[in-house]
Image (spheres, rainbow, N blue to C red):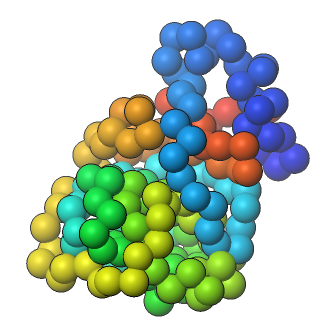
Amino acid sequence: MALVTTAEVCDANKQLIEVGELRVLEPIFQIYGGRRTFSGPIVTLKVFEDNVLVRALLEEKGDGRVLVVDGGGSLKCAILGGNTVVQAQNNGWAGIVVNGCIRDIDEINSCDVGVRALASHPMKANKRGYGDTRVPVTIGGSRICDGEWLYADSDGILVSKMELSI
């Protein structure tokens, strides 16, 4: 999506929005990370106040993918931290969207990875390893499936059933 904004994508694809092929997430996410604009195929994860599976997925090669984590909207602890984002950067992930909290903001902001999250929180998450990978999740008012495409910039976040060619 080089040099094309999410606003331009919305303007050019009204028919896809009308039929639900292209969705706009609610503007509830704060912008973090050194990469303000990012896009890629989605890998989904559902956890609650537990970050073991977040770390495990980001240990994989990212190949330009975007991890979408449904953390249940919890504001009680951070499920993503600076060390894990450094790992994501080193493994080639384009971005991470967290329906929950993050921590180590200075370290996250120095990484070449796009990060969106509800807020920051100083407390660590649990380490139980509970959760589900590659399942449909609902965040930002939209159902998101593994393998769909995410496009993010300063205006917002879009999810598409297919890669967009604009």
Q: Is residue 70 above or below residue 23?
A: below
Q: Can I make out residue 75 in this image?
A: yes
Q: Is residue 159 above or below residue 14?
A: below
State the image quarter where residue 74 is shown: bottom left
Residue 3 lies, in percent from the top left, at 87, 47
Total number of numbered labels?
0
Query: In the shown orientation, is residue 25 left or right of residue 166?
Result: left
Q: Is residue 58 above or below residue 10?
A: below
Residue in the picture at 26% in, 46% down: 135
Residue in the picture at 73% in, 51% down: 154
* Figure quadrant of the N terminus: top right
Query: In the shown orientation, is residue 86 left or right of residue 136?
Result: right
Q: Is residue 78 above or below residue 134?
A: below
Q: Determine the residue located farthest toward the right in the rendered image.
A: 3
Observer-nearest of 74 and 37: 74
Residue 50 lies, in percent from the top left, at 22, 72
Observer-nearest of 137 and 92: 137
Observer-nearest of 105 and 38: 105
* Figure quadrant of the C terminus: top right
Residue 86 lies, in percent from the top left, at 54, 85
Observer-nearest of 134 and 159: 159
Residue in the picture at 18% in, 82% down: 127
Residue in the picture at 77% in, 32% down: 7
State the image quarter where residue 79 is shown: bottom left
Query: In the shown orientation, is residue 25 left or right of residue 34?
Result: left
State the image quarter where residue 125 is shown: bottom left
Q: Can I make out residue 67 in this image?
A: no
Residue 114 lies, in percent from the top left, at 63, 65
